[in-house]
Image: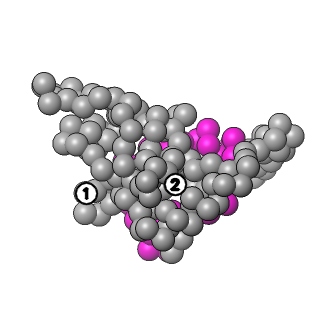
Amino acid sequence: MRKDELDLRKKSPIQIKNKKASFEYFFIDTYTAGIVLTGTEIKSIRMGKASLVDAYCYVVNGEMWLKGMNISPYFYGSYANHEAKRDRKLLLNRREIRHLQEDLKSPGYTIVPTLVFIDDHGRAKVDIALARGKKEYDKRQTMKEKEDRREMDRAIKHY
C-alpha cells in the first residue's frame, strides 16, 4: 500500500472496520476495491450504519462479490430502500481477480473485507485481504502480544 493511500484512509470521516478479521486471520495481501451500491446504501454508509462482521468475498464468473455485509436500511428511505444483507459486487481489475482466484484454490485461504471508507471523491471503497485462518495457538499468541503492548503503554504513561 502506498503512503498516499494510507493518508486517504486516515482522512476519511467514515471508517467501518472488521476487527474480528485481524484476530481470526493472517493477512497475506491487501487490495482496495470499489463497491457497487444503491442510493440509500451509500447514504447509510455515510451515516456509519454498516457492519463487516461475518462478511467474506467470493468469485463467480470472473466477478468479485461481497457477501454478508450488513448495511442498515436508510431511515428516510421509502419504498426504494435497499435489502440489508444482499450480495454486493466489488470492482477490481480482471488481473487482480484472476490472481485472487488462483490463491483461493489453496486450502485454508479466503478473502475478507477489512475496512470500508469514503474516498476523497465521495465514493465508498472497501479494503479486502487475502487471508489464511489462524490456529488456536496463533490466536492465543495474538492476545498475549496485545496484552503486552497495553501493559507497556500503561507503564510509559505512569512515568
Q: Is residue 27 visible?
A: no
Q: Residue at x 26, y 39 (%)?
A: 41
| Relative depth, front residue between 47 and 27 | 27
Which amino acid type is marked by label 1? Gly
Q: Report whether 102 appears left or right of 93.
A: right
**Place of residue 38 in the rendered image (x, y in percent of width and height, measured from the top left):** 22, 43
Give residue 142's quadrant in the image: top right
Residue 131's place in the image compared with 30, above or below, is: above
State the residue position of label 2: 128
What is the magenta range? 3-31
Earlier residue among tags 2 and 1: 1
Q: Position of residue 117 (x, y in %)?
A: 39, 52
Label 1: element kind: loop
**SS category of the residue bearing label 2:** strand
On the rendered structure, is 81 left or right of 102? left
Left or right: 63, with 128 as reference point: left
Q: Which mark is residue 122?
A: 1
Mark 2 Cα shell of 10 Å, populated few (<14), some (14-19), many (≥20): many
Of 88 and 44, nearer the camera is: 88
Residue sitting at x 36%, y 43%: 88
Residue drawn at 49 percent across, 51 percent down? 59
Visible residue check, residue 103: yes
Q: Quadrant of the N terminus?
A: bottom right
